Image: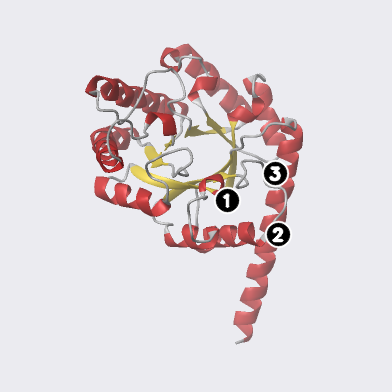
Amino acid sequence: MKYAICNELFNKRNFKESCLLMVKYGFTGIEIAPYTLDENPQNISYRKVKEIKKVLNDTGVQFVGFHYLLKAPRGFHLTVPDTSIRKKSWSFLKFLIEICKELGGNIMVLGSSKQRNAIGVSKEKTTSIFKEGLKDIAPFAEKMGVKILIEVLPSRVSNIINTIQEAKEVIYEVGSPSIAGMFDFHNCEDESKSYYNLIYNYSDIIKHIHLNEIDGNYPEKVTSDFLSAFMALKKKNYSGWISLEIFHFDNSPEIILSSTQKFILEIEKKLNNYLFLNKQNKDKI
């Protein structure tokens, strides 16, 4: 499996220093929130992109893709009745797709609860508008080789697409290889099934993983739930990225990276031991 870091962890640190720190702790990919590149990501220049690419090449870190797509600038919304606002919002996503492609990434995690929520219209109507927007942008994303991944968000932060089943229904209706889903441990509040069942049963749409605790912190203890989730990924031959995305930054990046590295090494060791013993038992039959 491939492991990455969401770059908010590094706050104002120099980009090259951040990449080198990641590599030190065994992470090979970086996932970026556009607002961290410029307070108005519409102003991201070719020069800025060139600088980022040089750092990535120099450090051997791979750009995974973008998330937190619409946090900045203000004024974007994908589903409001005002078609002019919707049009400029989806156009901005096209711009980010182009930047993503240029940097060598291939995913765009579409969460952005405040920019997709139902406002003034029903949940059903809002979901329909959202699907139409995805259908319109899908051919462009496919041409660029970039997947837009619908992020399931709990009902406390979003009033549409709160379960992976709801995401699957949208993805299937859009019907494009450039529109898929992802799995985030932190966003499973409204799910009734275990991590294992969710990952195993919806593996056809899961193209990316956000690693975190349900409270939004970094994982430290290898629980049975985490172990079963990684087992499901192994069984389904998951080959995508697993990106650490957290929302609490009380500890330094060094402590967080070190602790997460230990978590990953322990979980992989336990998985390998289990698979080895399982193979031995089968060979005896």
Query: Is residue 116 visible in the rendered structure shown here?
Result: yes
Q: Is residue 118 above or below residue 273?
A: above
Q: Amino acid at mark 1?
A: Met
Residue at 50% across / 21% down in the picture?
35
Q: Amino acid at mark 2?
A: Lys
Residue at which label 1 appears: 1
Q: Amino acid at mark 3?
A: Thr
Image coordinates of residue 108 in percent, x first then y, are: 42, 35
Label placed on residue 269: 2
With 171 as the anchor, is 64 left or right in this view?
right
Q: Is residue 207 above or below residue 137?
A: below
With 187 as the anchor, is 201 left or right in this view?
left
Query: Is residue 112 visible in the rendered structure shown here?
Result: no
Judge by depth and name the residue closer to the eye, 126 or 10.
Answer: 126
Judge by depth and name the residue closer to the eye, 119 or 201.
Answer: 119
Q: Residues within 10 Å of mark 2 (few under 14, many from 20)?
A: few
Q: Residues within 10 Å of mark 1 (few under 14, many from 20)?
A: few
Quarter holding residue 203: bottom left
Whether tag 1 and tag 3 are in contact, CB under 8 A, the answer is no
Name which of mark 1 and mark 3 comes first in the sequence.
Answer: 1
Residue at 48% across / 18% down in the picture?
49
Work out which residue is located at the far front of the displayed protein and give it.
120
Residue at which label 3 appears: 260
